[in-house]
Amino acid sequence: MTRARVLLLNAALGPLDYRVPHGMTVQPGSIVLAPLGPRQLTGVVWEEDRMPSAGEVGDNRLRPLLSTYDLPPLKDSLRRLIEWTADYYLAPPAAVLRMALASASALEGARTITEYRLTGFIPERMTAQREQALKRLAERQGLIRELAIAANVSDGVIRGLVKAGAIEPVEVDIDMPFNPPDPDHHQPDLSAVQTAAADAMVEAVQSAAFKPFLLDGVTGSGKTEVYFEAVAAAIRAGKQTLILLPEIALTEPFLKRFTARFGHSPVAWHSDLRQSQRRRAWRAIASGEALVTVGARSALFLPYANLGLIVVDEAHETSFKQEEGVHYHARDVAVMRGNFEGCPVVLASATPAIETRQQVELGRYTELRLPARFGNATMPDIQAIDLIAEPPERGTWIAPRLVTATAETLERGEQVLLFLNRRGYAPLTLCRHCGHRFQCPNCTAWMVEHRLIRRLACHHCGHTMPPPHACPECKEEDSLVACGPGVERIADEVKALFPQARTAIITSDTIGSPAKAAEFVNRMEAGDIDIVIGTQLVTKGYHFPNLTLVGVIDADLGLEGGDLRASERTFQQIMQVSGRAGRGEKPGHVLIQTHSPTAPVIEALISGDAESFYAAETEARRDAGAPPFGRYAGIIVSSEDQKLALETATLIGRTAPKVEGMQVYGPAPAPLAMLRGRHRFRLLVHARRALDVQDVIRDWLGALEWGTKVRVAVDVDPYSF
Ligand code: ADP
Ligand code: ZN
């Protein structure tokens, strides 16, 4: 090759051609360093016929490549996945490549890196900042920048502490090997039903061919134990496994469980990793040394050397849908990756999405069912509390029957989970004098009061402010009132009702990191917590045998949005949180507080008749031509300038092509009409299943132009419609 087409890690650019200098050899997939103006950018060599160039340049005017990285080239299967993802989700290929290369930060060549840690020596000259750093860095080791971030001080403060001898450098070998998991470490005795499901997956792993499975088992049926057998089969075959989890808070308990089964932990991949850990993991994945990787959705695009199995755990979870940058659904991309790699893909869920069930109907996915809980554990008994017939006392949110059930559970020495999917103390704060409501200056959202940190916060952009003593509108003092409950307020109510009980609030505010999540699990298992008050973070994955009562504070909350997915989402969420009750020897009880006990979704939850609920939902989708029977794509136009955003959206709407079987709605204000200071309008494209809607949108938007002040993003298969 004397000329090479290179896809650079710069989303604004298409691929460019370079000259391969004498003495350098490259092939498709080679990771190279290329010049661009005065800069140097990392990129990957691509086949010319699979990646059109951004600008043709004659041979004599090509600039030479600078160097190649000492790393294995990206395999064809991964490059096909990158092409497919860019194509399907209408994203720049470079933006997808960035996920595969972990934005190149994982690539640097050095074998060792210098990290820093405390020596224990306390320097004579102390400042407030030094003190803060020494206090916060007790258990940490990392690069200067990482420590500075962790301690919330400048790099200079850390450097000063190195000079003073309070922090010392340590050389860390990034090629330190990972211990391989042992497939025979601790093999469980599977039940007959479990064995049948495991065998089907093991066989697929051994035949090393693409085959998607839906592992559909009620909560506590042993889905994890069962797919672990498929993982063991992959390890025995010397193949790599990728396990995707919906939430990094779940990683730590998962690692514990994995280690109990396989003797050693898998390689973890998530946003909380230090850069050195990231580099080490990336290289071990690319070399094939990392036999099992567990990670959040971003682990999906890593360069596995020989992937033999993909598992998507809790596959129905909405957090697999990425809503920024490349708008992709990790569940669906996982299936495509299995297709390109030629390996089985297991989607595990107790409440599969209607889209996934439809794939089973069509015979594309093989369904494996685990219809009962493992061992003596039975499904919890679920009842509704009609909030109109049995209201809580004025100014409280827990109805008498749930209070009594909680008291009885505590008396038996068992644990209680109260579920409310609302962070903070109260969702809305207003002035009782003038009615002023606190709204985020950057978003169409109320500021939510968080009493634990004494601030009002926006849950969309992160903007916070101290709660003012006086209303900014009418200047009346001490006039602010909290409206409605959040988990912190429920926790206050619980403390007033059960002053002796030990409580914990579990939200992304309190267990945002894997370490904090692990601490929570340990405290639950040790019996140090009596009542958990939590958001959707506690609905998934956890297994606490002594937790026997689940109370749903407001089952109607998820139905408010009113889109076609609302009932399904509510059903999944309440089934999942109910699934936390009675997972051990003791039976579980679930009480659901609702204003509409006769709503189909609530009736289905109580009767346990999931099948007719799914059937009715599926029919409703079919009638509406909604997914999986039709498809949607959102076109989101945003700008800091509201008029410009609306004008551009209107232009896009007016130039919509007339295509048989496709309608375009809008523009209308997007579900969040303002986000992070940008005004947003949405056009919704609705099309027949068979229509290549991406192709239509590509031509349509490709013919239009807008300035740099407007951003247009396409959301293919949006979550809400
Ligand atoms: P799910 O993922 O379907 O909710 P889990 O895999 O978490 O279910 O299993 C629920 C509990 O039952 C776990 O504690 C698990 O270890 C246990 N369990 C499941 N199957 C077996 C088995 N065959 N032998 C021993 N314990 C099992
Ligand atoms: Zn905001």
Image (cartoon, grey):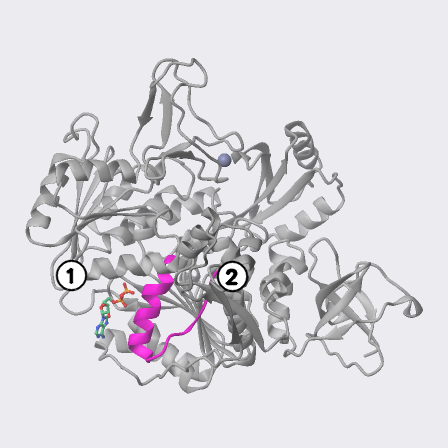
Q: Residue at x 63, y 29 (%)?
A: 642
Of badges 2 and 1, nearer the viewer stands 2
Q: In the rendered view, tell whether residue 311 sits above or below residue 667.
A: below
Q: Residue at x 77, y 63 (%)?
A: 52
Q: Which residue is mark 2?
A: 164
**Mark sitting on residue 378:** 1
Residue 348 percent coordinates (x, y): 36, 64
Where, by quadrant of the figure, is residue 580 drawn?
bottom left
Q: In the rendered view, tell whether residue 169 sits above or below residue 551.
A: below
Where, by quadrant of the figure, is residue 370 drawn?
bottom left
**Mark sitting on residue 558:** none
Residue 562 percent coordinates (x, y): 40, 36
* Amino acid type for the residue under numbered disc 1: Thr
In the rendered structure, which segment of residues is drawn in magenta?
249-270
Q: Residue at x 18, y 39 (%)?
A: 494
Q: Main secondary structure of the magenta part?
A: helix
SS category of the residue bearing label 2:
loop
* Res 628 visible: no
* Amino acid type for the residue under numbered disc 2: Ala
Q: In the rendered view, tell whether residue 29 sits above or below residue 490.
A: below
